[in-house]
Image: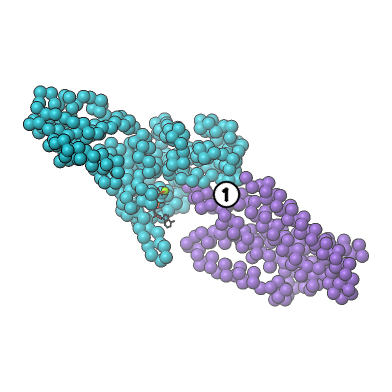
Amino acid sequence: MISELTRATLESLYMIFASGLLSILLGMPLGIILYTCAGSKRLASVYRVMDVSVNIFRSVPFIILILLLIPVTRRVTGTIIGPNAAIFNLTVAAVPFFGRLTENALNTLPRGVSDSAQAMGVTYRQFVFMVLVPETLPDHILNASVLLINLVTYTAIAGAVGAGGLGQLAINYGYYRFQWNVVLYSVIILVLISQGIQLLGTSLSRMLRK
Amino acid sequence: MSLLEVKNLCVSFSAKGKEFAVLDNVELSVEQGSIMGIAGVSGAGKTTLLRTLNLLQRPASGKIAFDGVDIMSVSQEELRVLRRRIGVIFQSYNLFRNKTVARNIAFPVIIEGVNKKKALEKAREIAEELELIHRLGSYPSQLSGGEQQRVSIARALITNPRMILLDEPTSALDPFLTSRILRLVKRVNSVHGVTVIIVTHDMSVIKRVCDQIAYLEKGKMVFCGPTHDYFSEYYLSVSHDDHAAEQLEKAKKILAENGGNKLVRLVFWGEAAGEPILWKCSKGLDVSVNILYGEIEEFKHGPFGTLLVATCGKDSAEFLRRLSGNVYKMEVLT
Ligand SMILES: Nc1ncnc2c1ncn2[C@@H]1O[C@H](COP(=O)(O)OP(=O)(O)OP(=O)(O)O)[C@@H](O)[C@H]1O
Ligand SMILES: [Mg+2]
């Protein structure tokens, strides 16, 4: 049983961090695009479309999203079960979420700071990479930890439909065979993972906040 | 030669679907190498005007020419280059919180592509001049207000700009720091020939450093010209200066009580402010002069004095005739 727990834990960690990484890599630019469109008169209509799309994606319950995505998942990953299929599902759900978190964090940049950068004659690229993101970095770190903790939960949900990992282990042993100790161990490990992420995120963000 | 030329500038904001004008047909001309003060009460549109000058705020209509270039018709790229020649010091400093003082100061040259080491070296030099050298490794949140302000000044000066725009640079400072900042502004202006536009509601700042003043009232430019002209013509004769109005009321009362036939306001400017003009002009005349109020202040270009006098005697008219040829401005009030 210990070996099974270890395997499931590793599987969970793989799903969480792989989908987390992908979601950050895709969600961050999405957030920057949202921020840029919101601040530009010319792109106001683009913003409205993106804003609504993000909201739609975020309001579909994850388990239903997985069902809706089945044909796409199969095309992209070649299967609908196992960690890789789950990573695809998780990423699709998390990108709009992280995009919104990023947009909110970017909005905390004071208008005056952005003005002073413009007044110095920054290019758009310099503004994004040398002012906008670095100035809000501690918030992005916190966002990343929120994202990863959400992914812990969502990974467990994905376990119910064959993703593998601790979620599936708990359901197989607890729901079908009433072996509550396995459920308990799974829960403890999940809690530890969440705590670890939160602790890391909070202290890193605090260190970066000046 | 004028460095900045603003014509028919109108700026409006929309609130609840309604447009309201904040700047109404503003005209402004700033000479190369001069210090221009923009004054007016709170909400008059001073900050808006300043923001419009480098197009942080787009005007509804009008023309802005900087160094002969119509900045409203240039491309984004050209506008960026132009902005790099105009340093801005904002009312609220707006430093980068997550960058050290050194990085804050160096930032404008780093974005120009100067290599980091050189940029930081240059930042060091300026920091030395502004007595910030011991603060280079600190973050803005660890600085006092005055230090933050000096960082923002250093940041504006590092690119050797043609012009700097300062928004209320002294509003948060004590008199000592105010003097220091004003001295610095004057030095930057006289040594490096940087043209300065300084927004303030503090008239003493205008008197001490400005060659020219532009006075805004509810978005309209009601005066634009030399500082001493403003104070002799406009400022003294309008009701918004409570101090002057109060002095006038008092003088009128004294005049009514003691008798006397003329109440005269005199303005001295420059060297004449030091001469015994009243004595000179009244020599040999049957006139008595009663000084009701007097003040002399040190302006940027020399002393500036005002006198409120009452005269009586049969030679009053001759006295006033002589006087008018000897003072900068004379106004017979009664
Ligand atoms: N972004 C904005 N949107 C709407 N109204 C604005 C905006 N910025 C300024 N205003 C309005 O424009 C007017 C002029 O504002 P401005 O900040 O230029 O005044 P000011 O002369 O700088 O005042 P203060 O001395 O208080 O700084 C004010 O009535 C203000 O409410
Ligand atoms: Mg203002």
Q: Position of residue A120 (x, y in %)?
A: 49, 45
The answer to whether residue A62 of the structure is visible from this angle is yes
Comparing B313 with A105, the one in front is B313
Seen at 30% across and 38% down, the residue is B227
The answer to whether residue A87 of the structure is visible from this angle is no
Q: Quadrant of residue A70?
A: bottom right
Image vertical order of residue A32 relative to residue B135, above or below: below
**Count of marks overlaid on the render:** 1
**What color is chain A drawn in?**
purple
Q: Position of residue B273 (x, y in %)?
A: 25, 28
**What color is chain B drawn in?**
cyan
**Residue position marked by numbered label 1 in the rendering:** A131
Seen at 80% across and 62% down, the residue is A190
Image vertical order of residue B160 relative to residue A208, above or below: above
Seen at 68% across and 46% down, the residue is A207
Comparing B260 with A29, the one in front is B260
Q: Position of residue B36 (x, y in %)?
A: 35, 40
Judging from the image, mark 1 belongs to the subunit labelled A
Q: Is residue B157 left or right of residue A58?
A: left
Seen at 52% across and 42% down, the residue is B108
Q: What is the residue that sits farthest to the left in this orientation? A: B314
Q: Quadrant of residue B186?
A: top left
Q: Amino acid at mark 1?
A: Val
Comparing B111 with B92, the one in front is B92
Image vertical order of residue B92 relative to residue B293, above or below: below
Q: Is residue A87 left or right of residue B303?
A: right
Q: Label 1, secondary structure: give it.
A: helix
